[in-house]
Structure formats: C-alpha cells, structure tokens
Amino acid sequence: MGIKENLIRLRKEIPESVKLVAVSKTKSVETIMEAYHEGQRIFGENKVQELVEKQAQMPADIRWHFIGHLQTNKVKMLVPVVSMIEAVDSLKLLRNIDKEAQKIKRRVPCLLQFHIAEEDTKFGLDMAEADAMLKQINMAEMTGVQIAGVMGMATYTENEQQVSREFAHLHQIFDDLKTRYFADDPAFGEISMGMSGDYQIAIAQGSTMVRIGSLIFGERNYP
C-alpha cells in the first residue's frame, strides 16, 4: 500500500483525540510531501540538521517535532523552527532550550522524556531525577519553554503485557507530575508514547500522541 492508503487506515484506527506524529527521518522531501498532501501536518525528526533542512524546503504550516536525543550544542539551530521538543532528559538541556528561545522571544513546548523500558538502551529521566529537576526550576522565569507533558519508549519486545505495563507506568508518572507540579497548567496534557509496533497498546493506556514511521512510509532509508 502507498502512503495515502496507509494514512487512511491509521486514521481509522487512531482516535481523533490522539495526535499522529509521522516519523519522517531519512525520508525525502518528496516522500514527506505525499503525506502532507493527504492532510498530515505533524512530522517527527531525530537529527537536527535534517529537520532544519527539510523545514526550509517545506510548507510553513508543518509542525516539526524533534524526537531524538538532543545535544545542547544543537539547540540554537533547532529552537527557531521546531514546534515541539519531545525528548528533554536533563535540567541542563531544558535551561539551554529556555535560554535560546528567550533570545528570539519564543516559547517552545517540551516533553520530559522518561526511561520506562526494562532495558538500558533508552535515554530518559527516572522519577527521582524529574523531582529534583522540577524542584530546582522556577517555571515563571523560564519563559522560553513550556513543559507540555511526558514522553517514553517501551522495551522492544513481543511481550505485550510488559509493553502495556511500561506504558501504564508512564501514564502514572504523568498523573503524579500533573498533581504535584502542573495542576493549574492546562498546557501540561501530553503523553507521547507508542510507535509503529505498539501504538495500539499505547492508546489503550492513555497515549495522546503516537510516533509512527514505517507504517506510513515503509522501512527507513539509511544512507
């Protein structure tokens, strides 16, 4: 099936309340434009240079999400063009985004990335680290960032019960943070979890945003 048919099928399966981030990393502008012409407006990239180059060539109403591990030395390049940074995993990174966004009078929505997988290959905070981070910052002064929710990746496994448990854990983290730090902040509302192999489990566990690549575009193109 082509990109059009893939998007039609996915939209039938994904509730309207759940945002679909089309993971377009390694895909050409021409390929991404096929999805754009079918109404897709949110795209996810995991390399800063690739996102910046594509953003410059493509329609201005696209909302670009950065979904990879972000190095602080790339923040300045990313902040002017990104719509959301989904993977903030340290106070240093959050402060850096805030500093660069304030310079250009932007407020960049960010998600706190949590390590929920039972494996060591994923980046992310644990609850103790998130507590320490949020207690150190004064959000009223951080006018360049908007903490909009949480993000996490489950273990790459065929054990659906384990994946479901990990997603449920992220939802619990979201609820805890909402209660303790963001009760009066309506912008804190996103739970970004679920990819091509497990998005249905994620949605069942309360995901508000899924990141899907291969089910839209086919397998990745590696240079």
Image: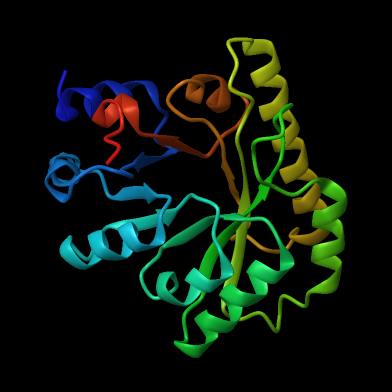
Q: Is residue 210 left or right of residue 32?
A: right
Give the image quarter of residue 160.
top right
Residue 196 image offset from top left, x and y in percent: 42, 25
Q: Quadrant of the C terminus?
A: top left
Residue 8 image offset from top left, x and y in percent: 22, 25
The residue drawn where x is 77% and y is 78% is 138
Q: Is residue 216 left or right of residue 102?
A: left
Classify 134 as above or below 10.
Answer: below
Q: Nearer the viewer, residue 116 or 83?
A: 116
Residue 117 image offset from top left, x and y in percent: 70, 30
Q: How is the image coloured?
A: rainbow
Q: Quadrant of the N terminus?
A: top left
Residue 186 image offset from top left, x and y in percent: 62, 59
Q: How many callouts does the rendering have? A: 0
Task: Find the residue positioned furthest to the bottom.
Answer: 103
The residue drawn where x is 60% and y is 16% is 157
The residue drawn where x is 56% and y is 26% is 202
Q: Is residue 121 left or right of residue 104?
A: right
Task: Find the residue positioned furthest to the front.
Answer: 223
Give the image quarter of residue 31.
top left
Give the image quarter of residue 92.
bottom right
The residue drawn where x is 75% and y is 31% is 169
